Amino acid sequence: MSRDDAGPDFVEAIARGVDVLRCFGESRSPMTLSEIATATGLARATARRIILTFEHLGYIRAVAEGYTVTPRVLELGTAHTLSSGIWELARLHLIDLVQATNQAASIAQLDGSDIIYVARVAVPKMVTLVVTVGMRLPAESTALGKVLLSSLNPDELDVALATPHRSAVAPFRAQDHDELRAELREIRARGWALTDEELHPGVRSVAAPLRNGEGAIFAAVNIAALASEMDLTELTDRCLPLLLRAAGQISADHVLLSKAPVATVASEPPL
């Protein structure tokens, strides 16, 4: 939409300020007042007032060669990502993962003895796994849940396993808790989990952890497939490396997302 069609509520002063910030993105070096005025089509006096305003707010800094933006402008760039959340950002990686494997991919977090799905990208098929965001499943019977349970210390694990399930789905093949604890130790050591027809007949899955900046697991991501479509060898040899790569990418995005606003503000001296 052009500015001429914006209507009476359009604030021209804000639009001009955005123009000034955007012009710095087209230049790798500081810009003089004249260069900024030329790039934006603004009068020098108008450009100067806008620059001084942004300088006072900490978004522009005067240097010997003219003016340059400060790291604080990253706050503006991360505002959308912060508001939409890590799951919307992660969904982009899930889409890539689904396209590469032709299998559904999901992210879940632990809640008591259940997992809760927080993001999912499905694959249109005649026969598919019916899973939706917000759905609960028993943690100990899913690859996602086993990854999450493996991150708990012994006391936390005891509490989780003693917590009644809120999921309406009962596992197809239950596992003894001693066997589960031994498997969780293996999962913790190798960094991923595999389930084969434990939750439901004909369903197998592989999952990997998502980690924050301190290395703690905050969620898990998986690929789920029908046994009739994919054998275990293909799931682990072809799909697992793709899953681990996606997990690393999502974890890296989480670190950037959580640290960028703090680092941006902290990098600036007091005004």
Image: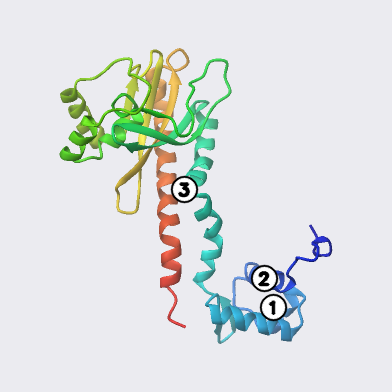
Reading the image, the residue beneath label 2 is: 23
Reading the image, the residue beneath label 3 is: 86
**Residue 243 x/y as whole percent:** 42, 34
**Residue 105 x/y as whole percent:** 47, 31
Identified at 31% across, 24% down, the residue is: 141
Mark identifier at residue 184: none
- Marks 3 & 1, CB-CB < 8 Å contact: no
**Residue 94 x/y as whole percent:** 50, 37
Image: 254 above or below 235: below
Identify which amino acid the numbered label 3 is placed on. Answer: Ile
- Marks 1 & 2, CB-CB < 8 Å contact: yes
The local crowd at label 2, few if under 14, some if 14 to 19, many if 20 or more residues have their Cα within 10 Å, is some
Reading the image, the residue beneath label 1 is: 36
The kind of secondary structure element at disc 1 is: helix
- Res 32 → quadrant: bottom right
Image: 250 above or below 129: below
Q: In this view, does 246 lie to the left or right of 153?
A: right
Return the disc, 2 or 3, that comes first in the chain's sequence.
2
The local crowd at label 3, few if under 14, some if 14 to 19, many if 20 or more residues have their Cα within 10 Å, is some
Identify which amino acid the numbered label 2 is placed on. Answer: Cys
Return the disc, 3 or 1, that comes first in the chain's sequence.
1
- Res 46 → quadrant: bottom right
Identified at 40% across, 23% down, the residue is: 235
Task: For marks 1 and 2, give the CA distance.
Answer: 7 Å
Depth check, front residue: 34 or 128: 128
The kind of secondary structure element at disc 3 is: helix
Identify which amino acid the numbered label 1 is placed on. Answer: Ile
Could one spot residue 27 in this view of the protein? yes
Identified at 53% across, 26% down, the residue is: 102
Return the disc, 1 or 2, that comes first in the chain's sequence.
2
Task: For marks 3 and 1, give the CA distance.
Answer: 35 Å
